[in-house]
Image (cartoon, helix red, strand yellow):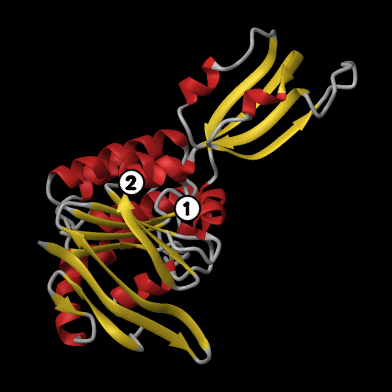
Amino acid sequence: MSALTVEDLTKRFGDVLAVDSVSFSVEEGEIFGYLGPNGAGKTTTIRTLLGFLNPTEGTARVLGTDVRDRKALVAAKGRIGHLSDDQAFDEQATGAEILDLHAAVKGDSRRDELLDLFDPPLDRQVRDYSSGNVQRLGLVTTFMHDPDLVILDEPTGGLDPLVKHRFAEFLRAERERGVTVFLSSHILSEVRRLCDRVGVIRDGRLVTVDPVETLLSRSGKVVRINSAEPIPVDFVDIDGVHDLETSVSDDQNADPDAEFTECTFTFTGDINALLGRLPDRELVDASIEEAPLEDVFLRFYGGDEDV
């Protein structure tokens, strides 16, 4: 059963078409990633789902409620948690006062559990918070009333690595409990760890909805190699190599058209097969990293071709 259904959703601001006939659904107990470059329409979609904006055309149903039905949506929000990408807490209030206010509106059955997990400084005013502490407090307010559906816009911004790890474990446990998560993110490693499926939006249009494995197979790895000895260029003459850059160190006499000592490229094939092709050379340095998600958008979703 779908916890969230979007049907030909369109939002215009004057002559600007921010969201263009977007349709998708999110199943109960699923973590769905909503991805796209800045300005693609992610936050506009979220604000429309929550009733902060009215659709120009089309609609969406959140926990069975049509977002155009304002009265019914207000009632449904008692079962929804929302984390904005820009928390608007009263900076003069303390963390404890913020939580008390949220509790009065929607309840706080999980407050103590979440405080143990995310530990924001409750006795300090929000104006004295770091960005990470604001995010920690936001996570508590998002989940403290035990929602059935959670909508998260860039949820790990400002968090240190330890808290990011705690959050990832917590979110996976929430999925096991049957909580549905709609997550906007631009961090590929976060998407890899958390999401079951992803939707990619570009220029207001949804260009694909895929299992996360499909996105990851397209994303590839950034490979950097620095060799003490020249390496034949045909080492990188293999399917899956993109954006190749090679160079020869000043102290080498290699032919730059036939050999290199340094290279950087994105590889979308089998890394083990690639490394198996590496000649027997002394390496100065080598690294394999996640490709930036922005590069994935540009390579696979940035042109006019179908995907």
- Distance Cα–Cα, label 2 vs label 1: 14 Å
**Nearer to me, 135 or 239:** 239
Residue at 40% x, 39% y is 164
The amino acid on which the numbered mark 2 sits, given as a three-letter code, is: Val
Residue 24, quarter of picture: bottom left
Image location (x, y in percent) of residue 271: 48, 25
- Residue at 32% x, 88% y is 57
Answer left or right for 248 relative to 241.
right
Q: Is the residue marked by circle 2 packed among few (<14), some (14-19), or many (20+) residues within 10 Å?
A: some
Q: For mark 1, give the secondary structure.
A: loop
Q: Regarding mark 2 in the picture, which secondary structure is present there?
A: helix
The structure residue drawn at horizontal position 22% and vertical position 50%, both measured from the top left corner, is 111
Quadrant assignment for the N terminus: bottom left
**Mark 1, other Cα within 10 Å: few <14 / some 14–19 / many ≥20:** some
Locate residue 7, reporting x and y percent: 25, 77
Q: Position of residue 166 (x, y in %)?
A: 33, 36
Horizontally, is 241 left or right of 51 in the view? right
Up-down relation of residue 292 to residue 179 (above or below): above
- Residue 186 position, x and y percent, is 47, 52
Residue 167 - label = none
Image position of 258 with respect to 58: above or below = above
2 or 1: tag closer to the N-terminus: 1
Q: In the image, which is nearer the foreground, mark 2 or mark 1?
A: 2
Q: Is residue 219 left or right of residue 111?
A: right
- Looking at the rendering, in which quadrant would you find the C terminus? bottom left
Q: Quadrant of residue 69?
A: bottom left
Query: Which residue is the site of mark 1?
Result: 186
Give the residue type at disc 1: His
Q: Which residue in the protein does label 2 denote? A: 212
Callout 2–callout 1 Cβ contact below 8 Å: no
